[in-house]
Amino acid sequence: MNAVGPKLVIATHNEGKLREIRALMAPFGIECLGAAELDLPEPEETGTSFVANAELKARAAADLAGLPALSDDSGLSVDALNGEPGIHSARWAEDEAGKRDFGHAMQKVEEALQAAGPESGRDAHFTCALSLAWPDGRIESFEGKVFGHLVWPPRGDNGFGYDPVFVPHGHEETFGEMEPAAKHAMSHRAKAFEQLVQWLAT
Ligand code: ITT
């Protein structure tokens, strides 16, 4: 049995992710500390994959806090845009001053899709890489994906980021319209989390 408790750093500065990871962790009775609570800096994401970026965030937090740390690197990949924004999903939302606006990011994705033309389709998927790092150097990573299509205009105020334009396959509501529990039952984050939990149980 692999163990992480009793305290785990959730190595993210994104409140939407923190809320979802806390909900997924709730049944396990582990005290979750957010990176902001511990005043941890945001490391520069220099990796070229979701897993590489998740690993550098988890490693930095575990080393600084001296506690096990769980990080999340995630994003939206659009088929017609050769997988962009992908690992650059947060950057697509930044204005010239570096402030994030996901209304702006969704608009940019829509404009790029329109430019690609209708024959390119509107298929997209979310990916989530979760990495769990320990202060002693151990690190484990897990990846989950959810496939669907993009709609326009954005719909719903739940979730965060690109949720209002993403409809998972087999559903009609966007992640922004779904109740949080419905998103947690099928999301990229939930799928990565399932693998993490299975690994913890081995
Ligand atoms: P941390 O690095 O501090 O965790 P971040 O927001 O910078 O926070 P990422 O680099 O992983 O995180 O950026 C991924 C972006 O992709 C994120 O800002 C979201 O807007 C978007 N994203 C990730 N998961 C999402 C989800 O479940 N629903 C909607 N958008 C999501």
Image (cartoon, helix red, strand yellow):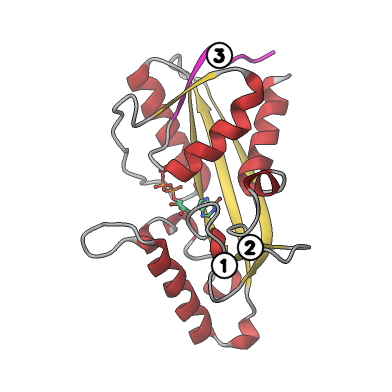
Q: Quadrant of residue 2?
A: top right
Comes first in the chain, label 2 or label 1: 1
Residue 54: percent from the left, percent from the top?
47, 39
Q: Mark 3, residues whose alpha carbon is within 10 Å: few (<14), some, or many (≥20)?
A: few
Is residue 72 at least partly visible in the picture?
A: no
User: What's under tag 1, amino acid-wise?
Assistant: Arg
Q: Which residues are magenta?
A: 1-10
Task: Indicate whether 114 appears above or below 198.
Answer: below
Q: Nearer the viewer, residue 154 or 71?
A: 154
Q: Mark 2, residues whose alpha carbon is within 10 Å: few (<14), some, or many (≥20)?
A: many
What predominant SS class does the magenta segment belong to? loop
User: What's under tag 3, amino acid-wise?
Assistant: Gly
> Which residue is denoted by mark 3 in the rendering?
5
Task: Indicate whether 108 appears above or below 193.
Answer: below
Q: Does any atom of ligand 1 lie closer than 8 Å to the CB of label 2?
A: no
> Which residue is denoted by mark 1 in the rendering?
155
User: What's under tag 2, amino acid-wise?
Assistant: Thr
Please tell me whether mark 3 sits on a helix, a strand or a loop: loop
> Which residue is denoted by mark 2 in the rendering?
174
Distance from Cα at disc 2 to Cα at disc 1 = 7 Å
Residue 115: percent from the left, percent from the top?
49, 86
Residue 42: percent from the left, percent from the top?
31, 38
Q: Nearer the viewer, residue 198 or 101?
A: 101
Distance from Cα at disc 2 to Cα at disc 3 = 34 Å
Task: Indicate whether 134 appears above or below 141.
Answer: above
Please tell me whether mark 2 sits on a helix, a strand or a loop: loop
Q: Quadrant of residue 168?
A: bottom right
Comes first in the chain, label 1 or label 3: 3
Comes first in the chain, label 2 or label 3: 3
Contact (Cβ within 8 Å) of mark 2 with mark 1: yes
| On-image quarter of the C terminus | top right
